[in-house]
Amino acid sequence: MLKIDINKALLGSSGEMNLSIDLEIKEHSFIALSGPSGSGKTTLLRILAGLEEASGNISLDKALWLDNKKSLAPQKRGIGFVFQDYALFDNMSVEQNLLYVNKDKELASHLLSLTHLEELKDRYPRTLSGGQKQRVSLCRALMNRPKLLLMDEPLSALDPSMRTKLQGDILRLHKEFGTTSIMVSHDPSEIYRLANRVLVLEQGKIVKDGTAKEIFLHTQGSQKFSLQGELLDIIKADIIYIAIVSIGQQIVEIVLDGSEAQSLKIGQTVQVNTKAFAPSLSQQV
């Protein structure tokens, strides 16, 4: 059981705030941290890793990591951390990057085999694609068989097809190594595939706690689906208006009447709802 009860003053996206987290996470869980930028997600990961200070208590099973007397050094916490920018050693080969953490060649070979990197073990990071670098980063994070794996938007720089591929790698390694995993992500589909619990942070506090379906499913009544998007433009065509909305990797057109068009502003987040082939648009609250 991972127990977290911490506080830290931060300067967030809307000014000063207090990161205040009181949380228990079961062993082998896969937790997704979601919420707007500047809400404290990455800072929470860094506090768990011992890379930033905070007041309060953190313990994993019987090991005390943080209290009012001490803060256990990062290297003594036995964690794995996957960074968004890979953080690989450019002067070391793929295999050497893994063995730097732990000299267990058998484990390194096993991880490279699981992620289909065994033929690249002698290559250097500068010769790898983004997806290959991220797989190396993931393997390296697991070289000390961590009880806790932390990932800070590890797939955000990759294209959709590569993201889906690596999501499978992450889930497979999470299960095989029996880790407790915590990942920061803004991608609902990614969170749905990977996480069994979602925590939404706003202004340093957990405002929602549930499954991906509970957090992201917003349909009501006879609505068939509901999606969030960004309103890019509103175009007048004869007596109607057409809204151009970006949803994920797609841009869609939705017909509006005059009153709807006047109530919306370019750049705002909107909710796209549909009832049996009749989509409608509303402001996101």
Image (spheres, rainbow, N blue to C red):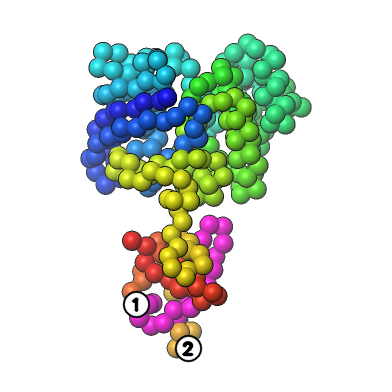
Give the tally of numbered discs. Answer: 2
User: Is residue 24 within the magenta segment?
Assistant: no
Residue 67 percent coordinates (x, y): 28, 18
Callout 1: SS: helix
| Amino acid identity at mark 1 | Gln
158 left or right, relative to 124: left
**Nearest the camera: 150 or 222?**
222
Residue 80 percent coordinates (x, y): 51, 24
Of callouts 1 and 2, the N-terminal one: 2
Residue 79 percent coordinates (x, y): 48, 21
The answer to whether residue 34 of the structure is visible from this angle is: no
User: Is residue 249 within the magenta segment?
Assistant: yes
| Amino acid identity at mark 2 | Asp
The answer to whether residue 165 of the structure is visible from this angle is: yes
Specify the label residue 262 is tagged with: 1
12 left or right, relative to 118: left
**Residue depicted at x 33% and y 16%:** 71
Q: Residue furthest right?
A: 119
Specify the label residue 238 is tagged with: 2
Q: Which secondary structure class fits the magenta region best?
A: strand
Q: Give the range drawn in magenta.
A: 241-262
Mark 1 and mark 2: Cα distance apart in space: 16 Å
**Residue depicted at x 31% and y 34%:** 21
**Residue depicted at x 37% and y 30%:** 24
**Nearest the camera: 196 or 12?**
196
* As drawn, 86 above or below 245: above
Indicate the quadrant where residue 19 lies: top left
